[in-house]
Image: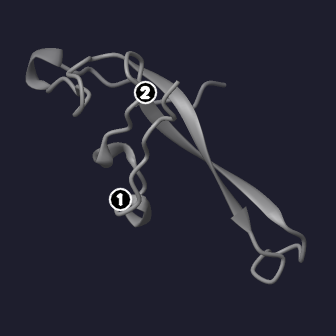
Amino acid sequence: MNNQQQMNIDFSQTTAEVCDKCGNDTFSEVFKMRSLSPLLSPTGEKGIIPINLFACAKCGHVNDTFLPKDDRDMKFTPKED
């Protein structure tokens, strides 16, 4: 059974998200990876935690509002080619 609730949203009452750097309005899903010390891990083993983010499909920038609250002071800038 599908447990997803269907919502009727009037998109005219929403605001488009755009890239803070270039103004593009399309984004790609990317992951930021964090390591977890064995001392803090519930299993006692080192862990890797993937964090979902959305990066601009044009320039790769991640808006501060897309970062987890604790990471907003850490800037995410894509590597220049």
Residue at 23% of width from left, 21% of height from top?
9
Name the spot of residue 47 as percent of width and height, x first: 80, 62
Name the one closer to the observer, 25 or 74: 74
Residue 72: image tag: 1
Q: Quadrant of residue 26 in the image?
A: top left
Q: Is residue 70 above or below residue 7?
A: below
Q: Mark 2 falls on what kind of element?
A: loop
In the picture, residue 69 is in which quadrant? bottom left
The residues tagged by marks 2 and 1 sit, at their Cα atoms, a distance apart of 17 Å
- Say what amino acid the circle numbered 1 marks: Arg
- x 44%, y 32%: residue: 54
Q: Quadrant of residue 37?
A: bottom right
Residue at 52%, 27% (x, y): give it: 29
Direction from residue 36 to residue 16 in the image, left or right: left
Q: Residues within 10 Å of mark 1 (few under 14, many from 20)?
A: few
- Residue 6: horizontal and vertical position, in percent? 40, 23
Instruction: Look at mark 2 in the image and give the residue it sits on.
Output: 60
23 relative to 34, above or below: above
